[in-house]
């Protein structure tokens, strides 16, 4: 095989991959738009201008040399406003390059007053890290919650006060997801992959349930 032919094959591969990715992205946008309109929500394929800046302090958005937000959905249920959007970040370079995809549900509300925190499903390597001093805030009175979630934050005392028995019990029985919060803002997302457009109604329902757990005056 000649060098010229080899490079030609590489070019065809990458161009073809780019075209396929573009087609899949357009199909997803169309499906997300249809699902949003069916539920009576607003849809913005290129994202809502200015809204990403409201959540940039969250841990999820601190890494990645390339980031993209699109397919934003804005809705309101029982006076609770929310936004759902796809987020992609690229980390590393060359062989270490990694692209992560998420579908995020975000809230900003006066009904929230949350200490800075980050929680995600706890895995074996988290437990190993905890034994070596890696922060993981556990609750002895609720081992079920502590075995499901890795909980971190800048003010452990405030976090322990925030997580009442009721909140811990409600979260313990749920499938673990990633949750970040601070003050009036809350975001929720799965630790791997995007949600299918057909899951939009379910995602809204699950997100609103978590919002109710985190809202003020939860004894």
Image: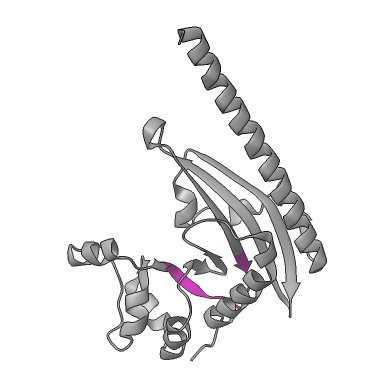
Q: Is residue 50 above or below residue 112?
A: above
Residue found 51% across the figure and 63% down from its top:
190
Residue at x 41% of width, y 32% of height: 93
Residue 51 in the image: above or below residue 18: below
Viewer-closest of 32 and 145: 32
Q: Is residue 47 visible?
A: no
Give the residue at x 67% y 44%: 25
Q: Quadrant of residue 37?
A: bottom right
Name the residue furthest left.
132
In-front residue for pair 56/26 = 26
Query: Quadrant of the image for the N terminus?
Result: top left
Image location (x, y in percent) of residue 72: 70, 55
Magenta extent: 106-119
Question: In screen coordinates, is 128 left or right of 112?
Answer: left
Q: Is residue 82 left or right of residue 143?
A: right
Q: Is residue 213 above or below residue 178?
A: below
Q: Position of residue 20 (x, y in %)?
A: 65, 36
Foreground pick, 175 / 212: 175
Return the residue found at the far front: 1
Q: Is residue 4 left or right of residue 128?
A: right
Residue drawn at x 29%, y 69% is 136
Q: Is residue 9 visible?
A: yes
């Amino acid at each position: 095989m000649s060098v010229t032919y080899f490079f030609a094959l590489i070019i065809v591969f990458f161009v073809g991959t780019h075209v396929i990715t573009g087609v899949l992205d357009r199909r997803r946008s169309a499906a997300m738009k249809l699902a949003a309109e069916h539920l009576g929500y607003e849809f913005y394929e290129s994202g809502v201008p200015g809204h990403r800046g409201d959540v940039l302090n969250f841990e999820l958005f601190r890494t990645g040399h390339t980031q993209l937000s699109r397919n934003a959905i804005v809705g309101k249920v029982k006076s609770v406003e929310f936004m759902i959007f796809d987020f992609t970040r690229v980390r590393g370079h060359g062989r270490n390059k990694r692209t992560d995809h998420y579908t995020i549900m975000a809230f900003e509300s006066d009904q929230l007053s949350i200490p800075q925190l980050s929680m995600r499903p706890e895995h074996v390597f988290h437990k190993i890290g905890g034994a070596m001093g890696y922060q993981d805030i556990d609750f002895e009175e609720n081992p079920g919650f502590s075995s499901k979630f890795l909980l971190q934050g800048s003010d452990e005392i405030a976090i322990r006060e925030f997580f009442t028995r009721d909140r811990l019990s409600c979260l313990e029985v749920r499938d673990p997801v990633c949750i970040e919060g601070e003050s009036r803002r809350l975001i929720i997302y799965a630790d791997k992959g995007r949600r299918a457009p057909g899951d939009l109604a379910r995602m809204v329902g699950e997100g609103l349930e978590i919002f109710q757990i985190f809202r003020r005056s939860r004894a």
